[in-house]
Image: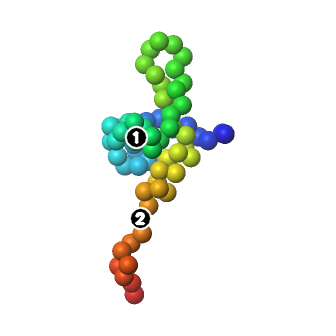
Amino acid sequence: MCDKLHSVQSVAEILDVSRRSVYRYIALGELSVVDLRTGPERSRVRIPGGDVQALVKRRLTQPAFGANAA
């Protein structure tokens, strides 16, 4: 349970996407968040590193049959 927690900006950089895309993944349930809010101000969400790895793994695609075949 000691996964490294990443900010939205950090995840955007890891995945080479916009912050908006990260929030979209969150809204779609593809990434979970930990809300570290300490008061009524803006939430401070963090994304577990394992979730980022799982998203990448789910999105991996295999090359088309015969592509790059030697």
Within the image, what quadrant is residue 34 found in?
Answer: top right
Q: Where is residue 62 shown, x and y percent of the image?
A: 42, 69
Q: Which residue is farthest front?
A: 28
Residue 51 appears in the picture as rendered: yes
Mark 2: secondary structure: loop
Which residue lies at the image location 66% right of the left edge and 39% below the top edge? 2
Q: Earlier in the sequence, mark 1 or mark 2?
A: 1
In the rendered structure, which amino acid carries the disc numbered 2?
Thr
Which residue lies at the image location 36% right of the left edge and 82% below the top edge? 66
Q: Are marks 1 and 2 in contact (CB under 8 Å)?
A: no
Residue 49 lies left or right of residue 64; in this view the side is: right
Q: How is the image coloured?
A: rainbow
The residue beneath circle 2 is: 61
The residue beneath circle 1 is: 28
Residue 11 appears in the picture as rendered: no
Up-down relation of residue 69 to residue 53 (above or below) = below
Which residue lies at the image location 40% right of the left edge and 87% below the top edge? 70
Mark 1: secondary structure: loop
In the rendered structure, which amino acid carries the disc numbered 1?
Leu
Q: Which mark is residue 40?
A: none
Q: Where is residue 32 shown, x and y percent of the image?
A: 50, 38
Residue 44 lies left or right of residue 21; in this view the side is: right
Which residue lies at the image location 36% right of the left edge and 39% below the top edge? 24
Q: Where is residue 33 shown, x and y percent of the image?
A: 50, 34
User: Within 10 angstroms of label 2, few (less than 14), some, or many (20 or more) residues?
Assistant: few
Q: Quadrant of the N terminus?
A: top right
Q: Which residue is farthest bottom?
A: 70
Total of numbered circles in the picture?
A: 2
User: How far separated are the C-alphas under marks 1 and 2?
Assistant: 20 Å
User: Within 10 angstroms of label 1, few (less than 14), some, or many (20 or more) residues?
Assistant: few
Q: Which residue is farthest top?
A: 40
- Front of the two marks 1 and 2: 1
